[in-house]
Image (tube, grey):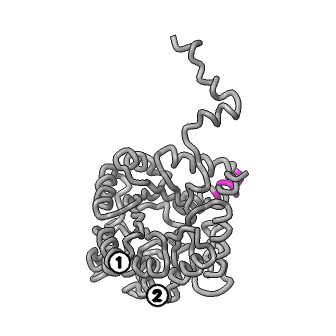
Amino acid sequence: MPFPIHRPRRLRSNPVLRDMVRENHLSPADLIYPLFVIFGKKVKNEISSMPGCFQMSVDNIVKEAQAAYKLGIPAIILFGIPEHKDASASEAYSPKGVVQQAIKAIKDKVPELMVITDVCLCEYTDHGHCGVIKKGKILNDPTLELLAKEALSHARAGADMVGPSDMMDGRVAVIRETLDANGYDEIPIMSYAAKYSSAFYGPFREAAESTPSFGDRRSYQMDPANRREALKEVALDIEEGADIVMVKPAMSYMDIISDVKETFDLPVAAYNVSGEYSMIKAAAQLGWIDETKVMMELLISFKRAGADMILTYHAVEAAKELNK
């Protein structure tokens, strides 16, 4: 008879016991902090749909990076907003691009901080899509060359890791080959391996100024209804040379995080995306939830699902809470 011999509440009776038997733990070392860099000086534009997040010029990005590192956050990921957009996304791979400048400045002031870069074209194209367009169609193979050029330019600027997020077929292999051929074989690739076509990206598109001028991204990002397909996408990226694989978004896709963790032996990243962040902020502003408790519960749920690292706009707030 389970009861009264077995009383699970015995191990919940006080904080010490609860800590001793806790199955999953969250620390600042688990967090990656996304930042948006823009041209100019002393620029700090608040993103209206993402309270507490900003488009920042390089000087302010450096300060933000320094503050994050002091809190124990080991890595940031950079997204760039260019001065000029065109069909070939030329500022994405320009040596004078805003991300390239930010990488150099951050590595100069905070060399220990890991600088990861988002490798995609959507912020840099005049149409807002993640690939080359011809007659209204997003072309896969011609896009790969531009993505490889972008990744190489980031490596040359001093990036520690690159993160292709475009979801073009074969991009990990082409980026790996290009980096290796140019002497950057030590640069790891964190692939957005299972990236879904999600409505949760809305606020990000304001932040990165990357809303498509026509259509949507369903022809290259994954269908939210599909589960098995995620394992296929992840397997292909691993075969092509990915070192870390990511699931994006995280909150509504914890089954995918769990599947990937159980199936593969690579580190798994989860992207706690803008819409997830903004919902918590909005509900907290209305007084409907305890923001800190909900934030921490959500982040630990990603660890419980199997994530080894979490990209989150909550990184600084969470690190401060964890350091108390």
Residue 15 image-quadrant placement: top right
Residue at (42%, 70%) from the top-left corner? 187
| Badge 2 element | loop
Considering every residue shown, the one lying at the far right of the view is 324
**Residues shaded magenta:** 281-287
As displayed, is residue 235 above or below residue 133? above
Report how far apart the C-alphas of labels 2 and 1 lie in the structure.
Answer: 14 Å
Circles 2 and 1: CB atoms closer than 8 Å: no
Percent across and percent down for residue 226 are 33, 52
As displayed, is residue 34 above or below residue 178? above
Percent across and percent down for residue 60 are 66, 78
Percent across and percent down for residue 150 are 40, 80
Residue at (56%, 74%) from the top-left corner? 36
What is the magenta segment's predominant secondary structure? helix
Q: Is residue 94 magenta?
A: no
As displayed, is residue 21 above or below residue 5? below
| Residue assigned mark 2 | 95
| Residue 158 appears in the figure | yes
| Residue assigned mark 1 | 148
